[in-house]
Image (spheres, rainbow, N blue to C red):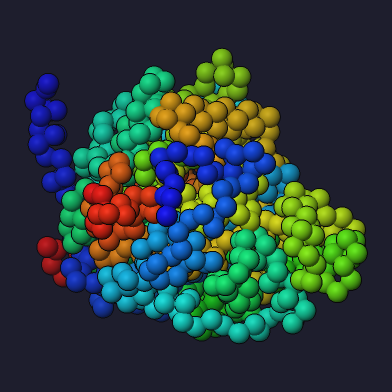
Amino acid sequence: MAGRDFALADHLPQKREGGQPAPPEELPRQRNGITPQMHGRYPDYNVLDEADHWDEVTRQVVLDRVDKVPEIRFFTAQEAACLGALCDMVMAQDRDPRIPVLNMVDAKMFEGKLDGYRYADMPDDRETWRRVARGLDAAAVQHGVTNGFAQAPTDVQHEIVQAFSEGKLHGEVWDELPCSNAWSVVTRGILSEFYSHPWAWNEIGFGGPAYPRGYMRFGQGQREHWEGAPASDADPVREDTPN
Amino acid sequence: MTVAHTLRTFARGSIRPPDNDSAFLLDVHRRAVPTERMARYGDDFEVDIAIVGAGAGGGVLAQRLARQGWKVVVFDAGPFWDPDADWVSDEAGSHKLFWTEPRVIGGQDPVELGKNNSGQGVGGSMIHYAGYAPRFHPSDFEVRTRDGVGEDWPISYRDLKREYERIELELPVAGEHWPWGDPHHYPHSPHPIAGGAEMCVEGARKLGIETRVGPVAIANGAFGNRPHCIYRGFCLQGCKVNAKASPLVTHIPDAIEHGAEIRGSCMVCQIELAPGDGPPRACGVRYFDPDGTERVQRAAVVAVCGYSIETPRLLLNSTSRRFLHGLGNSNDQVGRCVMVQGAPQVAGRFSTEARMYKAPPPEFSSEQFYETDLARGFARGFSIQTVGPLPIAWAEHVIAGGHWGRALREYMRDYNHWYALGALSELLPLPENRVTVTAEVIDRHGLPVARMDYTQCENDRKNIAYAKQTLRDILEAAGAQDILEIDRYAHLVGGCRMGRDPERSVVDSDHRIWELPNLFIGDGSVMPTQGSANPALTIMALASRLAGRLAAKKVQGAAAGGPTRRPAAARGTSP
């Protein structure tokens, strides 16, 4: 494994030509637990190993996200296919294992757990999601794909999502649904579900729930003994980690 | 070094508030507020005051008046929290802390509500605030006179100084000696700060920007039966430790001990007016109890403490034959001049790990840019603080930079190398920025919901742009290798401002609605301006001052208010 030097920032999109990151496939494969697509920036860190240190109420909430994936109940099959493809594109989930983002969004919509506000020129969030599905399928038609956004080639999907993110989708649904507000509504939902999942915490090296244990070591470069070491810190000869 | 200074340093952290036992009334082994001995009042019993909202304003008002022997009932639309059972050490799982009933946002620069600034339940938004507790500066009370913008308050800093000191002791507030505004000390020593904060303090120092640790409403050490902070970083998700101050742990226990009743999950929908054609006066509140049954509680005085969205909404929904456009709204002022602070966040990437999820989000701050400096090209200023976003908040920060897909994932994987600073820009009060009600959308009780319209003025935009540049400069001086920023807002104040002139305000300097002798507003909505300080401490100080004036019967024309009997002694024994 040729570890990257994370003291440098040259893997970051804004530091590279074209604004795209270093390919995540160059990272080691996750060795302990699961990350989405198994990218291993912290290859030996599995936040679920710490579950015994969490308070019972929190443990239940977090473990349910892994163990109890809800069925799709709110979206129709066609909407679910389209929006599932959108979630995969926004989160770059191009292969398994995937965090079931749309199932989690669907549960929230089904239970009516909304965020406490909506834009004056927008419908209810539930209706916004449905219209976005129609709008993406319509955008696919504009690219010559008549059987839905989900069936469009990856580069077409990418192009449509790029336009969506820039507020540049037009025609049909989009003439009545402000594009950038809709982007804000759906990405808020997607990000909230993806980064509430412990597999995502493994990938980014987040400590996860911290009650009642808390933290003692938070000075520069300090880690608790159980916090994940990044890939490049692991000396392949010496098994122990720094600090 | 003076004798006073030495004594104060020696006594730091050991002084107990003389007239608030809340921290000692909590249980050592569980976090929930003991309610076994809480008073219960019948709907037909005329209590001395009904308070709508158990947040920063309502909580303090209840505690102060209960101590003076008033019979108090406090309503809150949200639950009476049990931190052990109801709260989780998890971002997405904390959704229920926020006001998630429908609301509509409009204007050129719509303000996102919900988790950003709106709480529900006993403790209010202070359950999920970060914990920063700065005072306002003396200049905040006279910005029209000094800077020709905004509005002067009908009271001055002097009217609140004593209240600030009392509240700081009760929360308590920890921090270094404060050199800005009216210089002052804090009762608790500053907390340790994390590695990322240390780097930014150093970056600021290189640019000649002074910073201080604090002021944070988290006890440094155990405080009564409230344990020491464990630096877990989940302040915005409700403090399961009871270390961070909120009215739930700082004022509600003492209010209950002195005979106040707290009714959680009770949504007040109307202020009731006394029948007949005499001078109008409030006689109680109509509310939905936890089962959804509509009831009316009689009260001699009513205080609305529902914050800047729900307070105007309740007044506007309280229509009657005599008040067709809602209470307090004869001059079309209710809901106007609602304000938020510009709260851009700028994050920097460092070669060493910062792990900003650890330690409380509020670490240090600077008020060096708080006052007007015309060389900057705009009136008033901003403060600099730290924010410590957890993964979901960090993802929102990243995507705001236009990064989605693989780019988003890469910045997220890089989380542990980033540290985020935030500014609080003072945005000016504008009459067109307003809370109204819209019958097109109703809540689960069938009540029209609030609509908030917000548009920035030119001064606001200049302020935010300058603040962002200052944050970038600090991060770069600290050695940041990459920068990501997001525009956002924080806090709410105004909407029912206090003033000297009924044509331009909703309440007088005693928080009393101009049209009724016994209806008061005791929350942040009365603020005519907001400074660039987090509002919690000032809301509490205002409520404390109001309580003092009501109890001393100094409020002009407020008849009926308060008990005729002598202050009731605390029930049970104080520890």
Name the spot of residue B169 as percent of width and height, x first.
Answer: 24, 45
Q: Quadrant of residue B262?
A: bottom left
The residue located at (56%, 83%) in the rendering is A70
Indicate left or right for B228 with A123 as reference.
left
Q: Nearer the viewer, residue A192 or B380?
A: A192
Q: How many marks?
A: 0
Q: Quadrant of residue A175?
A: bottom right
Q: Could one spot residue B183 in this view of the protein?
A: yes
Q: Most extreme residue toward the top, as rendered?
A: B375
Name the spot of residue B365 as percent of width and height, x first.
Answer: 38, 35
Indicate left or right for A234 with B484 as reference.
left
Q: Nearer the viewer, residue B191 or B187?
A: B191
Quarter occupied by the N terminus of chain A = bottom left
Indicate left or right for A218 with B438 as reference.
left
Above/below status of B283 relative to B376: below
The residue located at (45%, 38%) in the rendering is A8
Q: Nearer the viewer, residue B112 or B306?
A: B112
The residue located at (18%, 68%) in the rendering is B28
The residue located at (62%, 61%) in the rendering is A92
Name the spot of residue A220 as percent of width and height, x first.
Answer: 30, 41
Q: Could one spot residue B549 in this view of the protein?
A: no
Indicate left or right for B475 with B218 as reference.
right
Above/below status of B490 relative to A184: above
Name the spot of residue A228 as percent of width and height, x first.
Answer: 34, 58
